[in-house]
Amino acid sequence: MKKYLQVIIALLAANSFAQSGNLPVHEIEKNSYKHFFQSNISDYKSDTNIDVTHYNLDLAVTYNPNLLTGNVTINSFSRTDNLTGIFLDLKDNMSVDSVFFNGALIAAVHSQDKIMMSLPIPLSKNDNFTVRIFYHGIPDATGFGSFVFGTHNNGADPVIWTLSEPFGASDWFPCKNTPSDKADSSGMKITCSQNLIPVSNGNLTGITNNTNGTHTYNWNNNHPIANYLISLAITNYSRYDSYFRYSSGDSMPVTNYIYPEDLNELMPLLDKTNYMLGLFSDAFGLYPFINEKYGHAQFGEQGGMEHQTISSMGVFGESIMAHELTHQWFGDMITCRNWENIWLNEGFATFGEALYAERTCGKNDYDDFIKNRMTNAKTATGSIYVQDVNSVSEIFSGNRTYAKGCVVLHMLRGITGDSVFFNILKAYASDTTIRYKNAVTEDFRRNAEKVYGKSLDYFFSQWIYGENYPKYNASKTTEKNGSNYFTNITLQQDVNSSPSFFTMPVQIKIIEPNRESIITVFNDQQIQTFTVISASPIDFRIDPDNWILKEVRGDNIVPVSFALEQNYPNPFNPGTTISYSLGKPSDVTVKVYDVLGKEVKIFRIGIQREGNHSVKFKAEGLSSGIYFFKLSAKDIQGINLQFEETKRMILVK
């Protein structure tokens, strides 16, 4: 930094940051979040006395009539001494035919969506046991469609599919219905009509053609897996294969199961998967299921689901494909321990979309993606840490869990810098205490602090367990003393609910007549003044590179509301400028009318970011008189009107 430009943290800014390099911890606020840190394990009424080690599903599925018949073998061990009874989760509408414990038939009660079993002998802690349950029925789909009998190709072809997240696994197979107990491995045998192809997790290890017009596909997954990631998808798939070559001599199959009527159209898009696998392997570490497969299975939900090694896709596009692939690291390999911490799945996967945009299209596309997610995040209510996990819509809130979760990672990137940030992601993904296991926010924070070398308590406390975002009021005063100008830049935050104000490093762009520079100050008080000494008068911008989810009001600030300004000049001949401000990204149209309401000019501007904008209007071929101009700003989907205003102007010839 040049000698003539200095930053002095003024009286209100005194803290230990500059001396120690560690960010201050607000103990009062930290204590107010104490109950969050102590509630990191939720098992959602599952049997906490057992630990599942393996699921083996042997299922027969028929279409018209619709029926699921099967038996599921579950290997487990006891987590306590003198265990005399256990239970597993299965919806009551499914019929249990028989239950075997260690090979012997036992009595069981199926009620209140649980299969309750009294054990023939008590189990000691760490004793292994096997339960095998025979059952049948038509699953009652819940959530996003836990088990669905549907059609495709305009109703001509059947398709059967599952999407168990968050609680739907027990709709169609007996299990311990919590993400915190990942099985060490799983297997799936699926028997169906020979004109249909059944798809599931892991590797296809065998196909048996049966004598009754059916065949059985045997799928085996050799990695730990959460129960909600176990999946099946069945239809008359066309298979499209390629290979991800991750070293000079090694490759992994990329296997896509696609509706025949859609395959030719989707092939160029599916071919991008290999590039995505390479990109994310570079960013996060090698694809975690490299000895099995990755691929897509088309299904009937209008979205995607990150089933382990085989994402189910109802729509295809580069962004959603990047999202579901990112989940293979963050969601599948490392699974949130409870749904309260779902942002560790969805926030990371949404950030994967941003990263893909950046690496393929450049920083401007990344910036636009983040800007749009920030617009969504500003409408989020409550903390990213989910308060009501009984509500599927609360768990999977798009504005909070996805958008704000993604923005949290973007803000952390701004604090640490690129090199450290991506080292944090790799450290988190390679942490053996959580790799192929479960994690909570504190696990990610622990890795972030270890790599960064400084406390991030203030960051995670307010952004994960707090709510809303900072609203800065910025102002300046300038005094000249000798040959120097002393500019006091004051940031005053609106009072927030929790935390009362936000602590963040804030970048300020200093604008001088012949140069620009960026300084970083640490804003840890509600009202705080920072002094800049310069050789000439300065202007400034708060957070010019948009690293913080925020609003800023005051000097030289991007507007936080919509406005249509009076044209200038007015009256005019022959041209004038129409200026307006957008408070958020919008689909913009400007129309000009004569006094009879006839449209004489239309500017279909399209999507613009928030900020100040203008269009130039030339009154060619128009006579003198009064005209009107109207600004219409819709949301970025072009559906809902966000702002509309009309003003009058005068043409004089």
Image: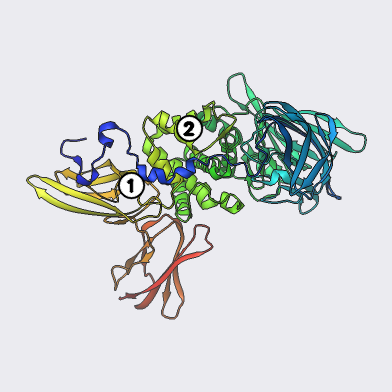
Q: Which residue is mark 2?
A: 425
Residue type, numbered disc 1? Asp
Residue type, numbered disc 2? Leu
Q: Is residue 309 left or right of residue 544?
A: right
Residue at image point 48% right, 44% down: 35
Q: Quadrant of residue 345?
A: top right
Depth check: give the residue in front, 382 or 612: 382
Q: Which residue is mark 1?
A: 543
Residue 506 in the image, given as x and y percentages of width and height: 32, 44
Q: Secondary structure at mark 2?
A: helix
Q: Secondary structure at mark 1?
A: loop
Residue at image point 70% right, 50% down: 145
Depth check: give the residue in front, 87 or 646: 87
Specify few, some or many for label 1: CA neighbours under 10 Å numbering under 14, 14-19, or 20 or more: many
Quadrant holding the C terminus? bottom left
For residue 460, the mark is none
The answer to whether residue 405 of the structure is visible from this angle is yes
- Identity of the residue furthest to the bottom in this view: 596
Quadrant holding the N terminus? top left
First in sequence: mark 2 vs mark 1: 2
Residue 183 in the image, given as x and y percentages of width and height: 67, 32
Residue 475 in the image, given as x and y percentages of width and height: 24, 55
